[in-house]
Structure formats: structure tokens, C-alpha cells
Image (cartoon, helix red, strand yellow):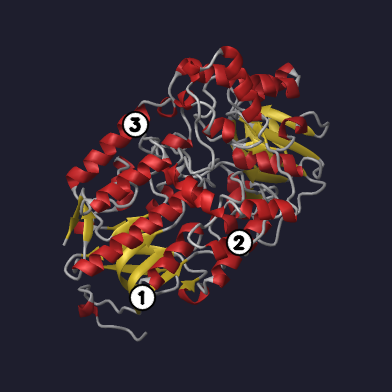
Amino acid sequence: MSPHSSSAVGLADTEVSLELDALIIGAGVAGLYQLHQLRELGLRVRAFDTASDVGGTWYWNRYPGARFDSEAYIYQYLFSDELYKNWSWSQRFPGQPEIEQWLHYVTDSLDLRRDIQFSTTITSAHYVEDSKRWIVRTDRGDTIATQFLITCAGMLSAPMSSVFEGQESFAGPIFHTSRWPKEGADVAGKKVAVIGVGATGIQVIQTIADKVEHLKVFIRTPQYALPMKNPSYDDRDVAAYKERFEELRATLPHTFSGFEYDFEHAWVDLTPEQRRKRLEEIYDNGSLKLWLASFAEVFSDEEVSEQVSEFVREKMRARLKDPKLCELLIPTDYGFGTHRVPLETNYLEVYHRPNVEAVGVRTNPISRIVPEGILLDDGTLHEVDVIILATGFDAGSGALTRIDIRGREDRSLTSDWSRDIRTTMGLMVHGYPNMLTTGAPLAPSAALCNMTTCLQQQTEWITECIRHMREHGYTVIEPTVEGEGEWVAHHDETANATLISKTNSWYNGANVPGKPRRVLSYTGGVGTYRELTLAAAAAGYKGFQLS
């Protein structure tokens, strides 16, 4: 499209290279479906992604051992039975290469590539009040004018990669797990350090332990880890889950977590023997069910939390055996489920290998990185050839605060969220008209959800919102101050009733120095959130101003 004059968008001395109805940031699970929907609506729309291809988190996270911990047959788009049934999974929890192939299949089946610009980073997005347009700039020199700015940048896409003093001095390579080289990295036969034992660190550790010469694992906060049962699928297994398509489509959007299972029993309704039987049965399922569908009270009742936590500790102790390893690797100062719960495959047994060393850094933290390796506070030097950072993300907000986003009166989202992280239903932010968000704070998609369930719901809400505006002659939507305040208050009241709010983790920003403290994810449940967002829309977009 030929350049347009600056007067068309009300920004002096600006040459616009492309005019759109909607611009999408990101070409992962949310961005791909959002692009499909808005094209079907007849909009001029384009998606932009820093990556060289589609996939979002499944493009970037190609570290050794990366795989689903949602069952493959529910981590799916559910708007088309044909799209669902024409792809067959090889396992219950497939690995990253297969997941990336699936997202290529979706992209090509829907012919989405022609409207995606890859290897392009959005650097700024400024709202121009007189033209009611966003002016968006990229690192490749594009200047785009768009009515709607839709962020599908991901809730875990801003890595915490510069976390230790002296990293640049290290003589060998340092890899953050979410920026693993596309061509791979050879760690075989080398002395390797892994810093961090969250879900990602666990997958890396259990995968490379038998390949490296020596593995040092630096442990600050141990995790309650559950064993994964990951059977391979034959033709009968595939046919069986495909036959459940309509059932899953009807069920997933309404459960607490967007998974197929939900809480069935209240703790107080069962005898101690019945509770133990139920815990054993769910534990044996080999999935996240113990976390997301055992007893809801585990999130709010300290006594129930302690009993379920002790059940998991008991299972871990039986496998670890060594009291020193138990002390390093089994949590005792927070409850099961108040952190992200990882699934693992023989992860605990890795520490019994002669070439694996567990290094506790809670009381003797990492001081700095030096050319030879990792230096602890007490002066101990751990010499290694390779450092792998499984140090997590600036979750929920980081993907957007790393872009220069400016709304009304030049207000900065980075500045606003540095003081107080607020949204309206995780879908919009007051002061930023026509900016619609997915995977943002204060919605279940920020953490507590089977991501495809929540991201589909949010993109569908956004699509229906834009359809409503076009049909009724509106050009601008923005949350009201009162509407946003009501949502934040409801979110906080719900979150503060949980033990998650009382536990330091990335769930409330505790892993990012200076980040405002607030539970990032809506904790009222996926089904409840869906009902509330749909009710707001049905009431004429209550809490929002349309003009």
C-alpha cells in the first residue's frame, strides 16, 4: 500500500507505510486465531512477530525436553471439528517439535501466512486522539496506522535473562531456555550449570543429565513436582479422543482451569480414608489433575493445603531417599499449588546420578558470574563450560512494558504498570482506547488456565466486540475508570482469599525486582470469568465507554 499523508492520521510529519483496521502483535496461539477471526470479519488486518515463523511460545521454547503439560487433545482450537480431527497427536504430552508442526498445520490450513510479517519487532505504539488511530512502528522502519491494536504477545514471553552481575564475562555460552538456539546447542560431554528448578528447569535437567559430563543444578526455591504419565497413542487412542470433540468443546470453557477435569468433592464431605483414596487415584493419573481438580480448598484453606502438600512431599521423599536431597528439593515453606506445578519424568532420580550435583543457593546465593563459572556469596567457585538460565519471565505484563505503548495524553503503559498493574478483565486498560489484550494481567490466561481454552475465549470476545462496534457505528471503545476499578477490586478480593496471594512467586510478580505486587491471574475460575465477560458484553459493554 502506498504511503499516506500525515494528515490522514493526525500525526504531523509522519509518513504511514500501511493502514489497517487491526494490527495484531504476536503469531502464537492467540495471534493466529485472532487473525483468522478478524479476516473472516472482513477487516484489513496483519500480525507481526519477532520470530521467523509462527508458534509463539512454541517457537521460542525449543530447549531440551520442552513439551506440553496440558493433554494434547485439549490444547486445541475448538472452533472447527475439521481442523481438530485432521491432526493426530503421537502422545498424551508431545514435545516441542511436534507442537510446532501442529501450529504450522493450523497456519497453513487457514492460509494465514500471507497476513503475517515475521522477523519484525513492534517497538512503539502511540494513540493519536484527533484521528482515533494507533501509530505503530517496527524495528524494520514500518510505520502503520491502525484503528485497533490487539496484543497477543504472550504471558510468558519476556525472559528474565540478565539476572546476574558479570554474565557478559563468562568464557562459555549462556543460554536462557526461552531463547535456545534454533540450530540447537551441543552440551554433550560438557560441564553444565542449570540455574532454576521451575517447570522449565526441570524439563531441561531431566533431559540432559545423562548426556553431559557433569551437571550442577543451582536450587533456590524447590518445587512440588508430579510424575507425568505420557503414553504413546495408537490409531485407537487417536480415534477415541477425536470422538470426544463435541464433549470437550462443551466442557473446557466452563471448568475452573480450562482443562477437561474439575473439582468434584469438597474436603469436608469426605472421611480421611476417602480423601487419601481420592488423592492416590488422582496422583496416579499422571497429569495436573492433583493441582487443578482434587480439592478446591487447597487454594484457600491452610489446613487442607498442608495435608495435600504433605501427601506430595511424602511421594517425593520416597523417591529421593537422601535426607540432604530432600531438604534441597522438597518445599516446606509454601503450599502445594500456590506456585506453578511442574510435571516431570524421573526428574528426582536424576540427583542420584554420580555426574549430577545439587547446589543449594537459598542461604548462600549466587554472587556473580565470572569467566570460569558461578561464584557464590561464600566465595565458592563452580567452574562450568555452559550456563543454562531457567530463570523465568517478567510474566503477564513484561511483554507489553518492553514496548513503548502510549495512550491518551501520552501516558505510558510501562510507567503506569510500574506503579500499579491494572486492567479491565484482562481485555483492556483505561487510558488506552481500542487496545485489546490477551494473556494480560487480571485474567485467567495470565497463568491459571489451559492456555488455548482461555486465549480462544478472549480472542472471540474481542472479535464480537469489534463486530458490535462496526454494526452499531462505534469507532472507539475504552474502559471507564469506574469499570476498571470495579474489576480490579473484584479481582483482588478473589485473589486475596487464596494462599497464592500470600506466597512469593512469579504469580504475583515477586520474581521481578520492583514489580508492583498483585496476583497476575484471575483466580475465580475460567468458567466464571467467561460468564462475567460475556455478561458485560450482553449488557452493552458494561464498564466500557463506546463512542
Q: Considering only order in the chain, which callout, 2 or 3, is on the residue closer to the N terminus?
A: 2
- Provide the residue designation for mark 2: 85
Question: Image check: 387 left or right of 294?
Answer: right
As helix, strand or loop, the secondary structure at mark 1 comes to loop
Residue 95 makes an appearance in the image: no
From the viewer's perspective, is residue 143 above or below residue 86?
A: below
- The residue furthest bottom is 2
Q: Looking at the image, which is closer to me, 464 or 225?
A: 464
Q: Mark 2 falls on what kind of element?
A: helix
Pick the residue in front: 210 or 220: 210
Quarter of the image with the C terminus in it: bottom left
Side of 274 where 95 appears, left or right? right
Residue 344 appears in the figure: yes
Q: Which residue is mark 3?
A: 494
**Image quadrant assignment for residue 216:** top right
Mark 2: amino acid: Lys
At label 1, which amino acid type do we have?
Arg
Q: Percent from the top left, x then y, of residue 387?
A: 67, 44
Q: What residue lies at 18% left-to-right and 43% top-to-bottom? A: 482
The quadrant the N terminus occupies is bottom left
Say what secondary structure mark 3 lies in. Answer: helix
Residue position for label 1: 44
Of the numbered discs 1 and 3, the one sitting upstream in the chain is: 1
Identity of the residue drawn at 74% across and 56% down: 235
Q: CA distance from mark 1 to mark 3?
A: 39 Å
